[in-house]
């Protein structure tokens, strides 16, 4: 499987962000990508307008345009958007999967940490989601979810060999170290391949969102089942296509040597 890590910087206008998705999807498809993974909150950045004002249903016009983009390029696209919640004035933080596969995941663990309260505007999801693409079962996680290994264990128990972590990671002291450590740990403690795609650092394009704002720091990566980085990007916006064939083929050997999935669940 060839997968594109689309480490972009989203703005506040959902229509302009669709142009960004279209451009990077076309670029990735031209480089042979089968799956294009965008970060969390690409529909609209967190440090922007009221999220309830921009939220759209998964079968609404914004999502339908993502589907059109995906199908026009012959790929599957995963992208962060906001959908209406059951509570008026709140939203769901949703990963839309569009194109060759169709599903969605609502973020379960909300970022009420480091002085920020995502739950003031966002309603949590309730169940893990996996989907199948080209013979690979794929799990979904969003940003703060990466701090909760039980979600990744549940995805692995459902057969996931690959987990996508889409993020809009808050900046601040030690946050890059947390991001890199946690993405590697989740791969190692489930012996799955993890593809972690965050928004790039807005400071690299001269935009100041403030320390701690959950907009992005970059450093997206592909992590093998043994916890080793296969690819790790920097802070700037870039889209990179990575062939996962070697990392996925190595999983049975890793799991034979380190059978944490077989040995777990004994407490």
Image (cartoon, rainbow, N blue to C red):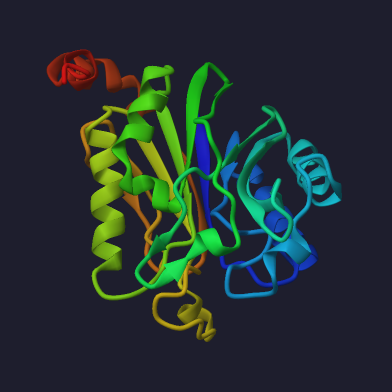
Above or below 236: residue 75: above
Q: Is residue 222 visible in the rendered structure shown here?
A: yes
Seen in the image, is 215 located left or right of residue 186? right
Q: Toward which corner of the image does residue 46 lie, by quadrant?
A: bottom right
Question: 41 left or right of 203?
Answer: right
Image position, residue 96 (x, y; %): 66, 42
Residue for point 82% across, 39% down: 59
Which one is nearer the viewer's eye here, 154 or 258?
154
Q: Quadrant of residue 173?
A: bottom left
Q: Is residue 190 left or right of residue 102?
A: left
Residue found 80% across the figure and 52% down from its top: 62
Total residue callouts: 0
Q: Nearer the viewer, residue 144 or 251?
A: 144
The quadrant of the rendering that contains the C terminus is: top left
The answer to whether residue 230 shows anywhere in this view is no
Name the outermost residue toward the left. 257
User: Which residue: 78% across, 52% down?
Assistant: 56
Of all residues, the one furthest to the front in this rendering is 87
x then y, percent, for residue 194? 37, 38
Position of 41 relative to 262 (above/below) = below
Residue situated in front as seen by the camera: 229 or 118: 118
Look at 58% across and 75% down and name the residue there. 47
Residue 23 relative to residue 78: left or right: right
Residue 218 position within the rendered picture, expressed as x and y whole percent measured from the top left? 42, 64
**Position of residue 114 measured from the top left corner of the image (x, y, whole percent):** 34, 69
């Amino acid at each position: 499987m060839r997968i594109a890590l689309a480490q972009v910087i989203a703005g506040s206008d959902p229509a302009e962000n669709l142009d960004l998705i279209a451009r990077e999807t076309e670029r990735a498809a031209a480089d042979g990508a089968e799956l294009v993974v965008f970060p969390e909150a690409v529909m609209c950045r967190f440090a922007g307008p009221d999220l309830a004002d921009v939220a759209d249903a998964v079968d609404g016009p914004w999502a339908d345009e993502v589907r059109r983009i995906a199908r026009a390029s012959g790929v599957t696209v995963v992208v962060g958007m906001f959908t209406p919640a059951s509570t008026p004035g709140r939203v769901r933080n949703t990963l839309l999967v569009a194109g060759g596969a169709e599903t969605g995941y609502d973020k379960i663990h909300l970022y009420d940490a480091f002085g920020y309260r995502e739950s003031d505007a966002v309603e949590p999801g309730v169940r893990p989601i996996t989907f199948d693409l080209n013979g690979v079962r794929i799990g979904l996680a969003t940003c703060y979810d990466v701090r909760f290994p039980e979600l990744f264990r549940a995805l692995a128990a459902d057969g996931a060999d690959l987990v996508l972590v889409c993020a809009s990671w808050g900046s601040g002291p030690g946050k890059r170290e947390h991001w890199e450590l946690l993405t590697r740990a989740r791969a190692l403690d489930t012996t799955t391949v993890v593809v972690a795609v965050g928004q790039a650092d807005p400071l690299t394009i001269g935009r100041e969102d403030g320390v701690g704002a959950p907009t992005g720091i970059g450093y997206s990566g592909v992590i093998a089942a043994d916890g080793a980085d296969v690819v790790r990007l920097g802070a700037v916006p870039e889209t990179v296509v990575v062939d996962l064939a070697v990392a996925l083929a190595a999983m049975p050997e890793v799991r034979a040597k380190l059978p944490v999935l077989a040995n777990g669940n004994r407490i």
